[in-house]
């Protein structure tokens, strides 16, 4: 059975907006993902794949010779080579707790796909504020900071009172009970009293990275 009719790829998106189409694999079948990669291979086009589970990754590899750099923690894959490194430490990706690392890794991998090598800092949540204060000098080097946090998601607000850089908050679905799958973290970031914080949807590390990329690109124009 051909799955070509299910797929219409946007090969010119990066030319238009500076960001390539990402292949969101959650909800797609293994066969559909394999068809996408076949079409990309014919066009010699690279892709970033997100929300690609271990099982689907293995299934896709069983359907063809597809070279992918796969990271099981972030559930991302590079199909073909990412951009050559063009910057280092211009973006800091920080997360409040180690439970937030999968989403933070999605941020970092998306940045790496576009050639930006970020500084990654984990487990600096406000429950142990000294951990954050110990890394402030490292954070102030960056041009943009992406803050990944669940639970009460207080970290972006605290950091917003300490640094001047653009802050992008990414709420995660980490938390008990009334955390409601990340809704509490999202609402906390949206009502933050620290002015100017940009907020993505829950667990949207890819979106947080793209916001950072747009800011960096605008700064270079």
Image (cartoon, grey):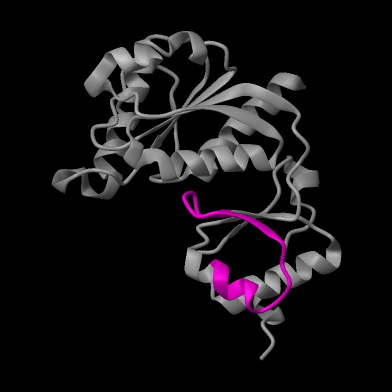
Image quadrant where one finds the C terminus = top right
Residue 154 appears in which quarter of the rendering?
top left
Q: Is residue 61 above or below residue 161?
A: below
Residue 201 in magenta stretch: no
The answer to whether 1 appears left or right of 125 in the picture is right
Looking at the image, which is closer to me, 60 or 164? 60
Q: Which residues are magenta?
A: 57-76
Q: Residue at coordinates 73% horizontally, 59% vertically from top-left?
A: 10
The residue at the far right in this view is 43
Q: Position of residue 112 (x, y in %)?
A: 65, 38
Q: Position of residue 93 (x, y in %)?
A: 50, 29
Image quadrant where one finds the N terminus = bottom right
Residue 210 visible from this viewpoint: yes
The residue at the far bottom in this view is 1
Q: Residue at coordinates 31% horizontally, 46% vertically from top-left?
A: 173
The answer to whether 211 appears left or right of 122 in the picture is right
Q: Position of residue 55 (x, y in %)?
A: 48, 70
Q: Residue at coordinates 70% horizontally, 39% vertically from top-left?
A: 114
Q: Position of residue 6 (x, y in %)?
A: 65, 77
The residue at the far left in this view is 177
Residue 195 appears in which quarter of the rendering?
top left
Residue 217 appears in which quarter of the rendering?
top right
């Amino acid at each position: 059975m051909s799955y070509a009719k299910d797929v219409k790829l946007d090969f010119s998106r990066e030319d238009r907006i500076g960001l390539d189409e990402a292949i969101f694999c959650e909800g797609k079948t293994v066969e559909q993902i394999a068809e996408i990669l076949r079409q990309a291979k014919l066009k010699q086009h690279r892709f970033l794949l997100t929300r690609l589970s271990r099982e689907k990754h293995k299934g896709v590899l069983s359907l063809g010779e597809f070279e992918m750099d796969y990271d099981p923690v972030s559930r991302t894959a590079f199909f073909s080579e990412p951009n050559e490194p063009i910057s280092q430490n211009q973006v800091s990706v920080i997360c409040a707790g180690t439970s937030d690392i999968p989403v933070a890794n999605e941020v970092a991998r998306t940045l790496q796909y576009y050639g930006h090598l970020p500084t990654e800092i984990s487990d600096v949540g406000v429950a142990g504020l000294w951990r954050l204060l110990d890394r402030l000098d490292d954070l102030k080097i960056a041009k943009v900071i992406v803050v990944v946090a669940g639970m009460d998601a207080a970290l972006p607000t605290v950091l917003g009172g300490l640094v001047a850089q653009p802050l992008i908050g990414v709420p995660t679905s980490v938390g008990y009970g009334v955390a409601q799958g990340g809704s509490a973290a999202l609402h906390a970031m949206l009502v933050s009293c620290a002015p100017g914080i940009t907020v993505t949807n829950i667990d949207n590390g890819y979106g947080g990275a793209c916001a950072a990329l747009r800011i960096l690109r605008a700064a270079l124009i």
